[in-house]
Structure formats: C-alpha cells, structure tokens
C-alpha cells in the first residue's frame, strides 16, 4: 500500500522561547554596580539587537526581565503604524500577529515594571531581510476555519519535504493553539517529520472553540529552506460521537454521548488486503467519490457513495451494496469497512470529521502517520514526540469514561490512494 499525500499548509503551539536574532539590548551600562534594595529598577534585555539587519520576517520581540515583568510592548513599522502582537505564555517574547514585511524597519519599545513600581524601558530598531530565495517547505494545515469537528480532532500540520529532527523545535515554536474554555495540549511529531499533531490529554470537550496559527512564513528551517506561509483558523468541537468496529463480531457500534445508539453489520478487508486495527479519525467525507487503483497490483475503478476516509492509504467506511450478503459475517473488501446503503447514508448524518474510529481484531495494525494517528498511542508515548518540553502536570484525567462520547473533556483533499471496494 503506497501512502500518497498532497500537502499544503497550517498549524500551531504553546511555545517556549523566541527566535534569538542577533544580540540583546540590555539595561545595565558598562561599569554599573548591582541594584540596591527593593527600589532598584528591573533589568531588561530585548531582541532583536538594536540596529540588527537581515532579520527574518518571522521575527518576534524577545524579552528577558530580572526583578520585574513586562508591562508594555509597542511595535511600529517605519511608517509609524503599530504592529499587533501577542505575548507567549511563558512571557519570553511577543509574537507579531502577522509576518513582518521584507526590507522594512521596525521599532520595538518595551517597558518592564519592578516590585517597587520603578520601570525600565528599552527600545530596539531592526531591519528585515529581503524575501528569501531559499526553497520553501510546503506546509498543510488540516484544520479549516468555521467548521464543526469531532471530539478526537487533532490539529495536524503536514510538511513536504519532511522537517529534519534538528529543525523541529524551531518549527514547533511557531505553531500556536488556543482553546476556549482552556484545555491545554501538546504537539507530537511523526518519526519521519512529515506530520505533527496537537491534542489534549483527553478528548476535546463539546462546544470548545479552537484557534490555530501556523506562523511559518519566512521561518528559517535548517540551513537550506524556509517556511512557506502563515495560516490561521478557528473552529468548534461538536457533539460526542465515536465508532467502534470489532472484527470478531463484524459489527460497528455507534456511540453518542457515551451510549450505543446503533449496531451496524460490516464487512472489512479480506486476508490478502486486511483492514488496519487501531484508533483512527475521520479525515474527510464524500457523498460520492471514485476509487481508482489502476497501476496497483489489484487494479479497479469503482464509484462509491457516502465514503468517509480513515487513512492516507485508502481505508474508508462506505456504502457497498455488492457486499450486503457478507456484511456481519465475512470480510471481502480491499481494506475498507463496507456497510449497506441505508447505514452509510445514516452515518453521514451522524458523524463529523474528527470523530474517533476504533477498529480491533484484524490481521494488521495501523501504521504511524497513515492518517491522523494522534490517538493511536497513549499520552505518555504521544508526548515523547514533542520537540519541546511538555509540562509535567499535563496528564489525562484520572478516570476516563469508556467512550469518547462520554468524556468531558473540510480539509484539503489529498490525491486518492484507494484500495477499498
């Protein structure tokens, strides 16, 4: 089975450190002695360095404060227009809400206030580099705006070519996710660097608003490439739905709000083309599509209805009137999960992109990265894939409900690589 991806753009992080661009401008003058008592003004250092040039358009204003906290940041361009920026959660920097423009000069004025009320202000002026001539890494954000997703929806960013391991921390720092109400999570990279997922320890709470930014435009990635674009999206989490498919019984259980609302007979992949077992996520839904496997070892072309993609390799849940007699007792497909026309049509009205689908008891396991596989491992294993430290207290809730539907807590279409039928 050949995985095929068409990658474009987007994603986001709760990050830690700003880009270190040049030196710092510090408040301590040469020869100055230590501050005395509580009346001392705070020490403040700012990046990029004053008069720095060739600064990437992905630059942010880094701040280091001793004896106080940043109370004001004002960034303006060379025409006096103010640049909107937001602070990192750890206070280490202020990130412009949009990429800076090439060949422009910017001024950042930062003020820190100490416990005594005394303030220190530092100003830095820097100039951005021309538009980079280095080849771009194409990124695709599989999280669109103004959608309603399922409770297992991971924020997924894909990259072509993949991100090398030594560059992943820099990329991850430029991926931002905000949730309302707050439900913090972590990023985790697929081992080959082709995808990175963001999820919380537990499934998203229904009604949660998720805002994502992949601020990658102009970001230096390794020595030879740069990021391609800056993308944002905001969407909500919808109702609680999950599908559980058991090869032993050839039945699908449809779980809503923690209760099984329907059982559906299925036929899955025959032994020569088995269905994958694991925890998957519905990636896209099509009322009609065509499976075309010409060029494979088992070529065919077939039109199908009510198809829901589970893997990049071409595993779907879909209507298969030709296998109704086998559904519930025999596996005859090329790897897809076959259901009747009526059941497939009903499922299309119940499921959402981002709903969890758990398949068990088949001959093969789900491969990492074959789809959005963020839930196919436990939390402890998931966070090992982060290129940045993960807060130690970020853990799943002590008592998990048996189904994601009971837990409190349209993407670009890839070129089809299909084997189902």
Image: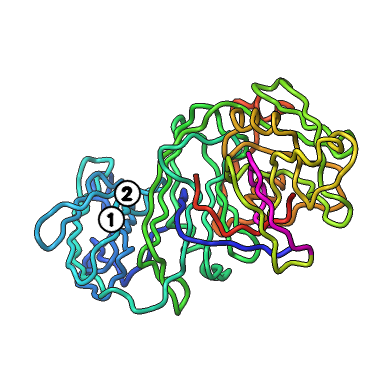
Percent position (x, y) of residue 78? 12, 63
Query: What residue do we see at 69% from left, 41% from top?
Result: 318
Disc 2: which residue: 67
Return the residue nearer the eye: 306 or 50: 306
Percent position (x, y) of residue 375? 67, 44
Task: Bin the neighbour count of mark 2 within 10 Å (Cα to Cα): few under 14, some 14-19, many 20 and up.
Answer: some
Q: Is residue 140 above or below residue 183?
A: below
Query: What residue do we see at 47% from left, 53% from top?
Result: 141
Residue 399 in sight in this render: no
Q: Is residue 288 above or below residue 151?
A: below
Percent position (x, y) of residue 126? 21, 68
Q: Earlier in the sequence, mark 1 or mark 2?
A: 1
Return the residue nearer the eye: 290 or 147: 290
Is 410 colored magenta in this rendering?
Answer: no
Q: Are marks 1 and 2 in contact (CB under 8 Å)?
A: yes
Disc 1: which residue: 43
From mark 1 to mark 2, how far is it between C-alphas? 6 Å
The kind of secondary structure element at disc 2 is loop
Q: Splitting the image into 4 quarters, where does residue 163 fall?
A: bottom right
Return the residue nearer the eye: 355 or 168: 355
Query: What residue do we see at 64% from left, 31% from top?
Result: 345
Give the magenta part as a residue range.
298-313
Left/right of residue 219 with respect to residue 421 in the rendered view: left
């Amino acid at each position: 089975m050949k995985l095929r991806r068409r990658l474009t753009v987007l994603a986001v992080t709760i990050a830690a450190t700003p880009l270190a661009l040049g030196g710092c401008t510090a408040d301590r003058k040469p020869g100055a002695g230590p501050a005395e008592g509580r009346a001392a003004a705070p020490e403040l250092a700012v990046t990029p360095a004053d008069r720095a040039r060739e600064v990437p358009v992905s630059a942010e204003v880094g701040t280091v404060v001793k004896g106080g906290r940043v109370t004001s940041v004002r960034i303006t361009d060379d025409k006096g227009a103010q640049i909107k920026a937001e602070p990192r959660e750890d206070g280490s920097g202020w990130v412009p809400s949009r990429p800076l423009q090439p060949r422009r000069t910017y001024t950042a004025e930062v003020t820190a206030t100490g416990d005594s009320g005394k303030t220190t202000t530092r100003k830095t002026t820097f100039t951005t580099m021309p538009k980079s001539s280095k080849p771009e890494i194409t990124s695709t954000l599989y999280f669109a705006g103004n959608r309603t997703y399922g409770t297992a929806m991971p924020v997924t960013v894909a990259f072509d070519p993949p991100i090398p391991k030594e560059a992943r921390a820099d990329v991850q720092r430029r991926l931002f996710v905000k949730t309302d109400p707050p439900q913090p999570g972590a990023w985790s990279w697929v081992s080959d660097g082709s995808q990175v997922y963001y999820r919380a320890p537990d499934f998203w709470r229904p009604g949660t608003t998720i805002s994502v930014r992949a601020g990658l435009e102009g970001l230096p990635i390794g020595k030879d490439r740069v990021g391609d674009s800056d993308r944002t999206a905001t969407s909500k989490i919808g109702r609680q739905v999950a599908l559980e498919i058991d090869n032993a019984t050839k039945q699908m259980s449809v779980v809503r709000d923690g209760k099984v609302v329907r059982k559906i007979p299925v036929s899955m992949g025959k032994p020569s083309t088995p269905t994958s077992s694991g925890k998957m996520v519905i990636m896209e839904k099509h009322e009609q599509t065509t499976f075309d496997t010409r060029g494979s070892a088992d070529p065919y072309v077939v039109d199908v209805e009510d198809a829901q993609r589970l893997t990049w390799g071409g595993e779907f849940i879909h209507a298969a009137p030709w296998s109704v007699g086998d559904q519930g007792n025999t596996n005859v497909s090329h790897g897809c999960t076959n259901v009747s026309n009526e059941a497939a049509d009903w499922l299309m009205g119940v499921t959402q992109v981002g709903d969890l689908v758990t398949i068990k008891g088949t001959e093969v396991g789900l491969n990492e990265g074959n789809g959005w596989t963020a839930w196919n491992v436990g939390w402890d294993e998931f966070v090992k894939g982060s290129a940045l430290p993960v807060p130690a207290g970020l853990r799943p809730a002590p008592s998990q409900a048996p189904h994601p539907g009971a837990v409190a807590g349209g993407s670009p279409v890839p070129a089809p690589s299909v084997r189902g039928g």
